[in-house]
Amino acid sequence: MNLRYLVPALGIIAVSIPVASAADTAAAAPVVTFDGWIDNKLTISSANYPADLPATSKNEKATEVGFANESSLKANIKVSDSVSGKINIWLSPADGTGTSVVDVRDAYLNVVVNNDLTWQTGKYERPIGWISPEPTGLYTVNNSLIGYTNIYGNDVIGTNITWAQKGVPLWGSFHLTNGYFTPADSASVTPKSAFGAPNSKVATRGNSDLGFGLDLTWNLPGDGNFVTLDLADDPHGGLPANYLLTAPGGVVIPALDEGGNALLVGLNGQYNVIKGLLVAAEVVMLQVGDAKDAGATVTNTGGRRTQGLILANYALPKGTASFPISFTGEIQMIEAKGKYAGADTEKATEETIAVLTNPTNSTWFGLNGELSFTQYTDGTTGFNKINAIVLSIEAILSF
């Protein structure tokens, strides 16, 4: 993923340089640098999607106006040329209960094994999908209808090994994690006590049934051009909320000890067609098997979700305007269906246009706008439909 504008490179850690000798690094103290961003949004929506699904009418209109704020503070630690680490903390002023939220998105260390292999272990932002988890990496204001908290999975705790050989276009990472698709996947495992039972499988996820992931990228000719294949298998990783858009009216999703086997296959890529014009596309399929309750299979609790996107971003040539401007057009589609009784096929599409600017001629500050049109339909009931128009204005500062 390329950044929509250059984030200042303060504190970025290189992990592709050869291992230094002990004599060169033994006396050196770790170097710690900081960077991050502050993101502010004003959103005006014609409907509270998806909460305002009407029960008795074909369309329900409501206007919502509100502000949102989120920020990130990152500490980059360099111990030596071969050992480094990162802590990335996201801060939200309040959640729905008025309580401030501190979310540790990254807390990992990197070890350069040799010129071709890098080992990473700890907690890190989800490795699946083309859409960036950071607002500084988006070509739109919002992370979109698809987003990264559903089918892309959670942030993960685990380890991965990356192979990238200089001069070879193919490179990739193999991941072994606590899992991918339920909140417990990003929770640390509490070791078994000598005087008590171990935590339940849902709480630990690491006692058994670890998640496995593989990301393979082929670098195409030209700067920033690539195609990526994402594979993830999580033996007990899927619950209905992860792949359905909503909980259909009248259907009670069972409270289960373990989700069914979740298998994700995704293909995405981007290509700079001409100078200033980037085109990207993605398709992802998530298939979830029947879940279990106290070790017994609960039939008709699985399902599948398929989604895709097409995006184009065009940056005006330098000198055309008094400050940098780029334009984005994006189309997204989702189809989801559960196997449990009463489930229906849900469909959603979203068309988005965005304008991204740096009005001060500085890559540190962006003032951006976005207009999106979302259509949602519940295939069985027929009257659960929403057509939402959303206008978002963003002021973002990176440092």
Image (tube, rainbow, N blue to C red):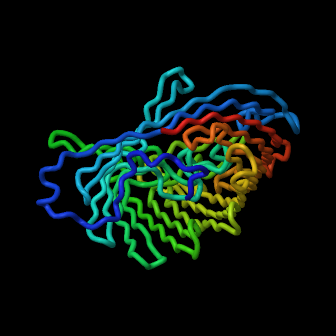
Quadrant of the snapshot with the N terminus: bottom right
Vertical side of 304 occupied by 198: above or below: above
Seen from the viewer's position, the closer of residues 233 and 124 is: 124
Seen from the viewer's position, the closer of residues 148 and 297 is: 148
- Looking at the image, residue 350 sits to the left or right of residue 298; the answer is right
Number of numbered labels in the structure image: 0
Answer whether residue 246 is visible to the viewer in this image: no
Answer whether residue 51 is visible to the viewer in this image: yes
Residue occupying the point 46% across, 44% down: 183
Q: Residue furthest bottom?
A: 168
Vertical side of 193 occupied by 303: above or below: below
- Looking at the image, residue 101 sits to the left or right of residue 251; the answer is left
Q: Quadrant of residue 236?
A: bottom left
Q: Position of residue 102 (x, y in %)?
A: 43, 31
Q: Quadrant of residue 289?
A: bottom right
- Looking at the image, residue 390 sits to the left or right of residue 58; the answer is left
Q: Position of residue 323 (x, y in %)?
A: 69, 44
Q: Residue furthest front?
A: 319
Q: Position of residue 254 (x, y in %)?
A: 56, 44
- Looking at the image, residue 382 sits to the left or right of residue 363; the answer is right
Vertical side of 394 occupied by 302: above or below: below
Residue occupying the point 64% across, 58% down: 305
Q: Residue furthest right?
A: 58
Residue occupying the point 65% across, 66% down: 272
Q: Position of residue 162 (x, y in %)?
A: 37, 67
